[in-house]
Amino acid sequence: MKKLTILLTLLVSINVLAQTDQDALKTIYSQSLTNGKAYQWLDYLSNQIGGRLSGSVNAEKAVQYTKSELEKLGLDKVWLQEVMVPKWERGAKEVAHFTSNYNKFDVNICALGGSVATANSGLEATVIEVKSFEELAALGDKVKGKIVFFNGAMNPELIHTFEAYGGCSKQRYAGAYEAGKLGAVGVIVRSLNLRQDDLPHTGSMGYMDLPNEQRVPSAAISTNDANKLSEALKKDANLKFYFKQNCKQFEDVLSYNVIGQITGSEFPEEIMVVGGHLDSWDLGDGSHDDGAGVVQSMDVIRLLKESGIKPKRTIRVVLFMNEENGLRGGKKYAEEAKRNNENHVFALESDSGGFSPRGFSFDCSEAALNKVLSWESLFKPYLIHYFEKGYSGADIGPLKNDTIVLAGLRPDSQRYFDHHHAANDTFDAVNKRELELGAATMTSLVYLFDKYGTSNIPQVKEFKD
């Protein structure tokens, strides 16, 4: 009889615990949807500041703006963390065209981040098309003196669009390196975009250890123009392609990660991070990539306060600088954490756009993931259902060790690459409600990990009615 009484008491306690968590999540979502700040912050970041490429004036404006807004929240501490970042400028708008059978066709291109410029007069040469590095290597000396056209498209059959992106992003990053080694004079890369449109998508590229004389100009071409060029090459293999870009690499400059903190009431030495990257590419205003992640992360710490939640553990919002073309901010933060012997137990990143949240992917042990799955019933009312092992985020990746739980917010990604690194990554493409749902979903996960830690999480799911 005594054992039965103890068991019933335990069951009641756990059901009360679950109900308390349900109430907490309901409050968090209500606060975000009726009293959110993320959309307001994003409006300013996007429309009053704009694109925030590392080392730019706008990046510095974004640092000062977000620091000021975090200070208004009454956090225990707000500070800037110095980090040296690369400075690359696009210069005057790029121009391009190809000529076939005496007909001229204008082309939409943009320089890839980190590329060298063409000569002042531009670059013109015949084109050789490939869809993989294997095809390129097989051509050997035939590449010399030509512009290599990487036309590897994202796979539309993959539902997880980031898998499609990963399947061909190496052509953008290392295309100029591989082609330059073989004597090419230039590189153009099909934009990483599932949609057929006229917008070129920029992104980072690298020359690695190539000597300067083999570093050739590299540009992205819109998907529509990539298709047109490919068709034209089938009819005229000797057509001429011309492009001119005016980009320039400068010496590294000083910038900052922006950090705000609520100190934990019971376990202040256990640090939980939530963040996104403050820098963006320069073609649009970086609303989805990653203005959304920045303002969602800022709102996490505000929503905890507004919901009356006093964290047990130290919660930090970290706005990382230079994710797009160097990852200097993420690396610097991890270096300082190690130098200061800080104990990071959890980190969450939002860097997949401001679309409707679907769940999270976790870089953690199987045991930790199983504990997370016990919270599925708490998220079900909000249509959050995706809890799987996988990639977390670039900026929090350097924090990885054997015990930390790393997580990435996973919004619906079907429209993300329509905007990614392109001129249409703008504020009008972000839905206010979807952005706020993402902030609430992130806050809810932070709340649960703060309450229960990364071990000994009660299995709430087993005691559902």
Image (spheres, rainbow, N blue to C red):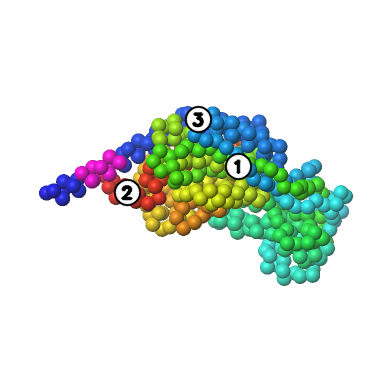
Q: Nearer the viewer, residue 284 or 439?
A: 439
Residue on which disc 3 sits:
74
Closer to the camera in the image, 49 or 182: 49
- Mark 1 sits on what residue? 81
In 3D space, how far apart are the residues under numbered discs 1 and 3 (Cα atoms)? Answer: 19 Å
Q: Amino acid at mark 2?
A: Pro
Q: Is residue 13 magenta?
A: yes
Viewport quadrant of the C terminus: top left
114 in magenta: no
Q: Earlier in the sequence, mark 3 or mark 2?
A: 3
**33 relative to 342, above or below:** above
Report the magenta residues as a range.
Answer: 9-17
The reply, left or right, for residue 432 in relation to residue 377 is right
Q: Which residue is mark 2?
A: 458
Q: Main secondary structure of the magenta part?
A: helix
**Mark 3 Cα within 10 Å, few/some/many (few <14, many 20+)?**
some
Give how far across and how far down residue 49 sits, in percent: 66, 33
Q: Secondary structure at mark 1?
A: strand
Q: Quadrant of residue 170?
A: bottom right
Give the CA separation, mark 2 to mark 1: 37 Å
> Which comes before the other along the chain, label 2 or label 1?
1
